[in-house]
Image (spheres, rainbow, N blue to C red):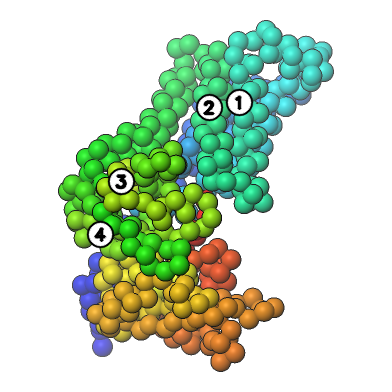
Amino acid sequence: MTTTATPLAQQISSRYRGRLRRGDLLETIMYFSIAIVLALFLADGGAIYFLDIKEVATGLGIVAGLIGTDLLLIMLILAARIPILDRTFGHDKVIALHRKLGKPVLYLILGHMVLLLIGYGISSGNNIIAEAIDMIVNLPDMGWAFIATGLMILVVVTSLVIVRRKLAYQFWYAVHLLSYAAVLLALPHQFTNGQLFGEGKMARWYWMAISIATFASIVIYRVILPTALSLKHKLVVTAVDVVGPGVVSITMRGNRLDELTARGGQFFNWRFWAPGLWWDSHPYSLSANPDGQSLRITVRDLGDSSNKLLRLKPGTAVSFEGPYGLFSDAARTTTKAVFLGAGIGITPIRAMLEDARVNPMDATVILRGATNDQVYLWDETYEICVKKSAYLRVLVGHRPRGVDTWLSNEAYTAGESLESLAPDIRNSDVFICGPTAWLDLVVEDARQLGVPEHRIHAERFDF
């Protein structure tokens, strides 16, 4: 007997296949960009460097610089929040790749500098230090290039997880703006000293084009578009409602919000134009599915500037960047879904559940909180589950001591597991949101149960 896919299953499948095709194309373009710079190097006679042992270091230095700079431009594009990248891979995966490229790019740029110092030193008879001084003094724009390398080292060091967790988000963000300065400072020496990018050569125009395109994408999608949308929609705070101890829901209204492409589960970067807040943007997920008239976020006092948000006044103007992220119903690959949220991570889960198209009994919702007060928006989530005929389990209590589990002590003692709470999880998309340590334990359980990687969707509350 043959079965016919339901319209919902067909829509989800078609959307997923389209996302895979876009992903393959975009990844191909990334790899192809590296092939292009190597082809330009060889077309300019670059192979000659490897015919003389004294020139090998110089040749390797040039290649390292070309690949390193190309990957650096890709890093900047990944951080530009271009909509097609966000809709294809999701914000988390795009930023994860951006971070992953950080160390290789730094190693390549450092290799470029050291190898060229060695190669030029062999030709001139200077040691590395003397050659560096000679280059800075006698070659145009080389001083700026060395400064750019120093800035890149600073950016990569602050990106290390062990360091990022000790830095305020505002400081980390400010330091990362230096990555743009590093690229701008490094670019001139490539055109004034690089033979490959000499006047009249095709490689020069190609390199200029990709550099301009990279910075144009940053300016358009990080500055111009958010500013234009904020001016168009004119968001203002209309209500600040207490949800629990140290937690409030902030409702905002504006003009023509039905034209925003936001979906439940996505996040925005918000800037509230109030004393002590206007200079800082705050990334918060929507806690209700957009209805075309209002947007709502739910904020917890984490001891930093977020505590000032609890005292916002109605009428406060709001500007924003977004929406961002693939943590929404758009990420679905199958008709069944399991939603897991802990603490403030429940809020985007609640918004996504409200937006999700699910058949009766095909959705399971699992909420976690150390106390009843920390199961935020419980009543709203319950009403949505009733309306959509979704299973709902609430696990309250601290985790058992000495055990790596995301379950409450009561659930763990009773022998509960992810599989017992969501028996059909292997055939479902799994959406998880909450503190990183808790979330990682849930992800690991889902993997051990055999849930395919492309069906595990995690939203981490870090930067």
Of helix, strand and loop, which one carries label 3?
loop
Snapshot quadrant of residue 151: top right
4 or 3: tag closer to the N-terminus: 4
Q: Are marks 2 and 3 in contact (CB under 8 Å)?
A: no
Q: Are marks 2 and 1 in contact (CB under 8 Å)?
A: yes
The residues bearing labels 1 and 3 have C-alpha atoms spaced at a distance of 40 Å
Q: Amino acid at mark 4?
A: Pro
Q: Position of residue 226 (x, y in %)?
A: 32, 39
Q: Which mark is residue 181?
A: 2
Of helix, strand and loop, which one carries label 1?
helix
Snapshot quadrant of residue 66: top right
Q: Which residue is mark 3?
A: 316
4 or 2: tag closer to the N-terminus: 2
4 or 1: tag closer to the N-terminus: 1
Q: Residue at x 73, y 11 (%)?
A: 134
Q: Residue at x 45, y 27 (%)?
A: 211
Q: Nearer the viewer, mark 4 or mark 3?
A: 3
Q: Which mark is residue 148?
A: 1
